[in-house]
Each structure stands twice: as C-alpha cells, then as structure tokens.
Image (cartoon, rainbow, N blue to C red):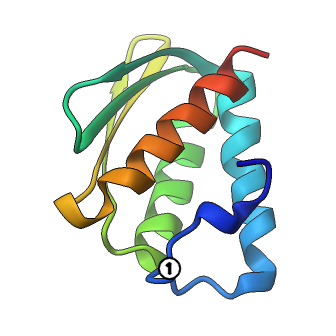
Amino acid sequence: MSDPAWVPQSCTLPTEERPLRVAEWDALFAERLTSLARLGPLRLHLDLAGGPGIEEQVRDLSEREGGCCSFFGFTVTPGENRVGLDITVDQEHAAVLEALATRTAARGQR
C-alpha cells in the first residue's frame, strides 16, 4: 500500500494527480491525527489536532476527495482544539475504507 494502486477504478481523479492527493492526506494524518476509531465496517472516525486553518484544510480536502470519489461521505465537525472527520462508504467500497484506515493509522504513528 505504499503507492496509490489501491485507489479504486471508480475514482475520477486523473491518474497523474493521485500521488499528490495521497500525499496531501498522508501529510494531514502525519501532522494532525490524534485518534482513529472504526465505528463499523463502513465508517471511520478521525480526530485531528486543531489549529489555524486546519478545519478549512480538512473541509477543502474532503470536498475535493468527494468530488472524484463519490462513494466517500465526509462529515467535518469542529471542536475546541480539534477537528473531527467521519468518513463513510457504501458496502461495495468497504475494502477501500479498510485500506484507508490502515494507511491512516500508519501515517499517524510517525
């Protein structure tokens, strides 16, 4: 899972842009992830450390991701000094969410 080959074919982001998007998510998780919880096979909850511009960054990235991978659902919830991010998928894309959870946990442990 060190390359974006796990990204499903239903993603409409041009192939050459995928490594850049993956890098954006990886950087966010490496810098901001404070906790990760699997709330079921189709839902992942992340808590990210807050700070100036972080909520906007998470909203922007989530919106762009939802635009190319419509099977994702994103809910951004601001809190005091944190940003919550819930990610959901349909049953067909459960394996994609599992891959994302594994990747996220690995990046957040760095």
Q: Amino acid at mark 1?
A: Cys
At horizontal 19% and vertical 31% (from top left) the residue drawn is 40
At horizontal 48% and vertical 35% (from top left) the residue drawn is 101
At horizontal 41% and vertical 68% (from top left) the residue drawn is 66
Can the viewer see residue 51 in this picture?
Answer: no
Image location (x, y in percent) of residue 80:
40, 11
Can the viewer see residue 33 in this picture?
Answer: yes
Image location (x, y in percent) of residue 68:
48, 79
Residue 51: quarter of image: top right
- Between 78 and 21, which is closer to the camera in this rendering? 21
Residue 71: quarter of image: bottom left
Pointer 1: what residue?
11
Q: Residues within 10 Å of mark 1 (few under 14, many from 20)?
A: some
Image location (x, y in percent) of residue 86:
31, 37
Q: How many marks?
A: 1
The image quadrant where one finds the C terminus is: top right
At horizontal 22% and vertical 44% (from top left) the residue drawn is 42
Residue 37: quarter of image: top left
- In this picture, is 91 found above or below 40? below
- In this picture, is 84 found above or below 59? above
Indicate left or right for 79 with 88 as reference: right
Indicate left or right for 110 with 88 as reference: right
Indicate left or right for 23 with 52 as reference: right
- Between 69 and 92, which is closer to the camera in this rendering? 92
What secondary structure is marked by label 1?
loop
Image location (x, y in percent) of residue 82:
47, 17
- In this picture, is 96 found above or below 30? below
